[in-house]
C-alpha cells in the first residue's frame, strides 16, 4: 500500500496500487504515515503520483498525520498532485495548511 524509500534524511512515501484515498484505505495510510513521525524531526515527502481522488477520510488521515508530525517537529511536503487532487486541496483550503510543491526534485530539495 505504501512504498517507503529513504533518500538522505528524507523519507519519500509513494502509494502502491492506490488511485483513491478513501474510507477503504485511509486508516491504513494514516497508520503507516504516523509511524514515520515517531522519531523527532522526521522529513517526509508524500508523493501523490497516481492519486486522483480523496474523500473526507483521506483528508482526515492527512490532517491527523500533520498533527502528529507537528508534535514531533516533523515536516511534511506533498508533491506530484494530480489536477483533480490539487483542486480538492484548494476547495478545502488545505493548500494553506500543507506545503505542496508540484516538482518532485524541487520538493526533495526544499526540506530545511
Image (cartoon, helix red, strand yellow):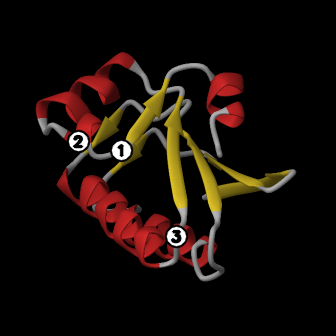
Residue 108 image position (x, y, % from top left): 70, 35
**Among numbered discs 3 and 1, the one appearing first in the sequence:** 3
**Label 2: which residue?**
94
Question: Which element type, helix, strand or loop, lies under badge 3?
Answer: loop
Q: Are marks 2 and 1 in contact (CB under 8 Å)?
A: yes
Nearest the eye: 16 or 46: 46
Front label number (2 vs 3): 3
Q: Quadrant of residue 26?
A: bottom left
Quadrant housing the N terminus: bottom right
Nearest the eye: 59 or 55: 59
Q: Residue at x 18, y 54 (%)?
A: 56
**Label 3: which residue?**
73
Question: Which element type, helix, strand or loop, lies under badge 1?
Answer: loop
- Gap between marks 2 and 3, in whole Å? 20 Å
Mark 3: give few (<14), some (14-19) or many (20+) Cα within 10 Å: some
Residue 70 image position (x, y, % from top left): 42, 69
Q: Is residue 44 above or below residue 14?
A: below
Residue 77 image position (x, y, % from top left): 52, 43
Q: Is residue 84 left or right of residue 78?
A: left
Q: Residue at x 51, y 74 (%)?
A: 34
Nearest the eye: 110 or 15: 110
- Gap between marks 3 and 1, in whole Å? 15 Å
Q: Is residue 90 above or below residue 30?
A: above
Q: Residue at x 38, y 72 (%)?
A: 27
**Label 1: which residue?**
98
- Gap between marks 2 and 1, in whole Å? 6 Å
Q: Is residue 89 left or right of residue 4?
A: left
Amino acid at each position: 500500500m505504501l512504498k517507503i524509500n529513504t533518500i538522505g534524511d528524507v523519507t519519500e512515501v509513494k502509494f502502491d496500487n492506490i488511485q483513491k484515498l478513501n474510507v477503504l484505505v485511509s486508516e491504513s495510510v494514516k497508520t503507516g504515515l504516523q509511524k514515520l513521525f515517531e522519531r523527532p524531526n522526521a522529513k517526509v515527502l508524500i508523493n501523490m503520483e497516481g492519486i486522483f481522488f480523496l474523500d473526507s477520510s483521506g483528508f482526515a488521515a492527512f490532517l491527523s498525520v500533520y498533527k502528529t508530525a507537528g508534535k514531533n517537529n516533523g515536516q511534511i511536503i506533498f508533491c506530484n498532485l494530480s489536477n483533480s487532487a490539487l483542486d480538492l486541496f484548494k476547495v478545502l483550503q488545505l493548500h494553506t495548511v500543507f506545503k505542496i510543491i508540484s516538482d518532485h526534485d524541487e520538493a526533495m530539495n526544499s526540506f530545511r
